[in-house]
Image: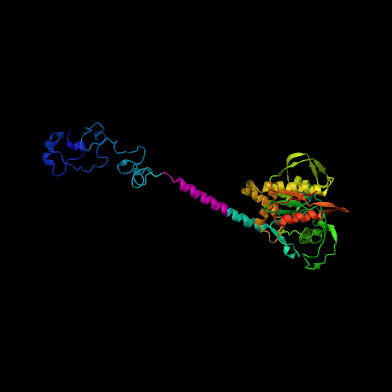
Amino acid sequence: MPRGTLFGMNDWPEGRSHDRNARYGRGGADAQPEGARVMPHVRPGSVPPQQRPGYDDAPRSAPGFDSGYNTGQVYGMPRGAQGPGGGGRGPGSPYAPAPGGGARPAPDWGRRVKVGAITLAVVVLATSIGTYFWADGRMRREVDLSKVIERPQEGDCTTYLIVGSDSREGMTAEDKKRLHTGSADGKRTDSMMILAACGSGNTMISLPRDSDVEIPTFVGSQSGKTFKGTGRRVKLNAAYAEDGPELLVRTVEHNTGLRIDHYAEIGFAGFANIVDALGGVEITIDKGFKDKKSGADFQAGKQTLDGEQALAFVRTRYAFAESDLARTKNQQKFLAALADQAATPGTVLNPFALYPTLGAGLDTLIVDKDMSLFDLAEMFFAMKGVNGGDGTSMNMPVSGTRGANLVWDKAKVRELVRQIQNDEKVTVTSN
């Protein structure tokens, strides 16, 4: 077959034409090895397909033989994606080896976890700070304890005067009917209690609204005028009705000798809304009771109370023989259960539970001007701790009555106050 027909060319490389016939077909019989040949450029398409050398057209040992299998070409992959030699491992290829050769290094999972943890911590911190300032800005700091005069010395425990008022603020006519609150103007104290947060144990002391107390000399919260004490004795809730929270704090301090560090008050609507925001509060009722005035209708046993039911539970007094004393016990029991459910990771760390709860309570919660959100949180955790092994829940000790008023046991009250002031374990009991 003519050479030009097979290779599409008429000339061998310059300088080799003189011995081309002598070397052609001699294979390895020549005494000297054949030198490297420079092949002329072959234009694509210049060789008809039927004349191109195939897999079996040349001996496998022939110089320059290439079967196509030693290129490492990955079939189906564009040649542009392959590296030198068609192996698919050139720069930019997903199959490229790591710099310096060898396999691609495994992911540094330790570093990824560390970065993820730091990111999560930053997000949680930012959210917590935002929540703090949002909630702190909604607190109603309306009580000025600096107006209270002749105050007892400070003790080792932090004391809170917690007041539930019958305020109908923000309630619609439908709300008042549903919650059985009536439509009285103004507001009065519906419940009062002292919470002492101590290292030796937390103590919650209910102050019956019918307690017989003396109104001392005080400075009017609005007028700034001094009103001299005359020894006048009234029910405890009359002090609030006469001049508001400041006179109530002054009266409690004068009759107990215990300094009040913080004041917190919540109305009917706020109380019911907090309970509903928590999804109800679970409590065990020892004995069923009914009361048309409060709307109470309870069976004995464990149950979850919604806001309406909870308000009826803590307000009921006419269904009990001891009226006010029995009611204060129910109030303590429910508040401790509420705090136990509110001060949990499921509420505090869950924004879908925390924000509705704070929003429901802060709008109607009135506190003293020095009370921070941190102090409020401490109060709730102290209420929760009352149910703990070191906690104490009791009524103010009573020794008898004066008319319809309950007279406190002075000796027991004095010892109770001494133990709280000195952060001692409370051993005094109520009747």
The region drawn magenta spans 106-125
Residue 412 within the segment the image draws in magenta: no
| Residue 16 image offset from top left, x and y in percent | 13, 42
Residue at the spot 31% in from the left edge and 41% down from the top edge? 86
| Residue 8 image offset from top left, x and y in percent | 21, 39
Q: Nearer the viewer, residue 49 or 192?
A: 192
Q: Nearer the viewer, residue 125 or 50?
A: 125
* Above or below: residue 227 compared with residue 22: below
* Above or below: residue 137 compared with residue 299: below
Whether residue 191 sits left or right of residue 156 in the image: it is right
Quarter containing the N terminus = top left
Q: Is residue 365 visible?
A: no
Looking at the image, the residue that sits furthest to the top is 56
Whether residue 355 sits left or right of residue 147 in the image: it is left
| Residue 286 image offset from top left, x and y in percent | 77, 40
| Residue 131 image offset from top left, x and y in percent | 62, 54
Q: How many marks?
A: 0
Residue at the spot 66% in from the left edge and 58% down from the top edge? 372
